[in-house]
Image (spheres, grey):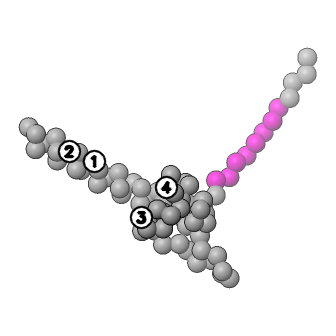
Amino acid sequence: MATTSLSISVVEKRMMNMTEAAHYCGIAVRHFKTLCPVQPVPIPPKYKQYDRTDLDKWIDDLKAGLETASQSAILDRL
């Protein structure tokens, strides 16, 4: 009986173009342009790329606001 071993190394992209960034955030590109406050990083000579860590921070900040609002709503009902 033969056995085979496969070793795969996956490197996550940190920088993404607008389409990739929108998909990463789960937003349509047309909505991403208006909703996302994250500024792209200019990479010479002509590229503008979104940093994954900046996108993550934006999403985390959105979630933090929801948690605070939810806690306040619960306390108001008591």
Query: Where residue 52 appears, x then y in whole percent?
Result: 54, 60
Name the residue tied to disc 3: 35
Query: How far apart, in angstroms, are the residues tagged by discs 3 and 4?
Result: 9 Å
Q: Which residue lies most toward the left here?
A: 78
Question: Of marks 4 and 2, which one's residue comes earlier in the chain?
Answer: 4
How would you rate the neighbour count of disc 4 (Cα within 10 Å): few for under 14, some for 14-19, many for 20 or more? Answer: some
Query: How far apart, in angstroms, are the residues tagged by discs 4 and 2?
Result: 26 Å
Q: Is residue 71 visible?
A: yes
Say if mark 1 contacts mark 2, CB within 8 Å.
Answer: yes
Name the residue tied to disc 4: 27
Question: Of marks 3 and 4, which one's residue comes earlier in the chain?
Answer: 4
Mark seen at residue 67: 1
Question: Of marks 4 and 1, which one's residue comes earlier in the chain?
Answer: 4
Residue type beneath disc 3: Leu
Residue type beneath disc 4: Ile
4 or 2: mark nearer the eye: 4
Residue type beneath disc 1: Glu
How would you rate the neighbour count of disc 3 (Cα within 10 Å): few for under 14, some for 14-19, many for 20 or more? Answer: few
Q: Quadrant of the C terminus?
A: top left
Please check the rendered image and state whether residue 10 is part of the magenta-colored stretch, yes or no.
yes
Say if mark 3 contacts mark 4, CB within 8 Å.
Answer: yes
Look at the numbered disc 3 and give the secondary structure of its residue. helix
How would you rate the neighbour count of disc 1 (Cα within 10 Å): few for under 14, some for 14-19, many for 20 or more? Answer: few
Name the residue tied to disc 2: 71
